[in-house]
Amino acid sequence: MVDSGQVTATLRLSVGDLRLAHPISVPAGAVPATAVVPALQGLVNATVAAAEEQIKGAGKAVSCRKGCGACCRQLVPISHTEGERLLAVIDALPGRRRAAIKTRFDEASAALARAGLRDVLLDPAQRTGRTDRELSVAYFALGIPCPFLEEESCSIHPERPLVCREYLVTSPAELCAGPVQDGVTPVPVPKISLAARGLQDDADSWFPLALLMTWSRTRRFSCRLKRTGMDWLQRFLKKLASG
Ligand code: SF4
């Protein structure tokens, strides 16, 4: 169905144990990949809601609460496409807020540089020999709050990355603050965010959200390539199926 520049289709997905029928709307015309991020956000939201229903059926409940920002000190891997989208979100903020957030990004980048992690995390070629898990533990040990975290809540909640949406736990909140998250029980949400990586450049590449500004100054990547919304969606679904 095409309506006011958008084309809508119902996606029927079988992801992990979940079965999902989700209406998804994307721009009908040629757009950069960032323009389909809202559709992917809606898909992840629907998947997370279905996963929550599933655990409720098993008598469990999500223990995440507003004001608990423990997980917002973890390494948050984001795709290049989401990085471009978040840069636009920051650019649209009022000047003082934008400046405050950029300062926090600079502080996070400096802390990672002091710990010898900044270059490693920005350059996939330098990550060899260290697993993602090792990097995550080393990152979390630094206790760097996400630059978007304000009063222990996400200040860009409607625009937060896909991977943030997928992370919910059923274990006591205080366990999330432990150094290696011993005893933390995540809700088993299929990681749709992985399929968003490499949407534009075919590489399965990611970088930490906290290095968004640093990445933006050095990236070789461009979001000028345009495809129809359906073409982007097909690429995404192909990656989802192959993953
Ligand atoms: S973007 Fe929001 S939810 Fe994600 S880590 Fe940052 S503050 Fe937390």
Image: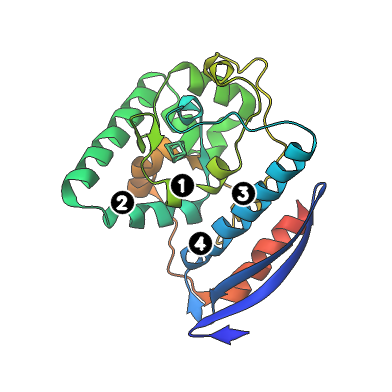
Distance from label 4 to label 2 (Cα)?
16 Å
Q: Can you identify the residue that label 1 sits on?
A: 160
In depth, the one of 177 and 212 nearer the eye is 177
* Residue 203 visible at all: no
Contact, mark 4 vs mark 1 (Cβ under 8 Å): no
Q: Is residue 84 left or right of residue 217?
A: right
* Residue 127 visible at all: yes
Query: What is the three-letter code of the residue carrying label 3?
Result: Ser
Which mark lies nearer to you, 1 or 2? 1
Distance from label 2 to label 3 (Cα)?
21 Å
Q: Earlier in the sequence, mark 4 or mark 2?
A: 4
Query: What is the number of the mark on residue 38?
Result: 4
Contact, mark 4 vs mark 2 (Cβ under 8 Å): no
Q: Can you identify the residue that label 2 sits on?
A: 90
Q: Can you identify the residue that label 3 sits on?
A: 193
Q: Earlier in the sequence, mark 3 or mark 1?
A: 1
Instruction: Give the number of callouts.
Output: 4
Which mark lies nearer to you, 3 or 4? 4
Q: Assess mark 3: CB under 8 A from ligand 1? A: no
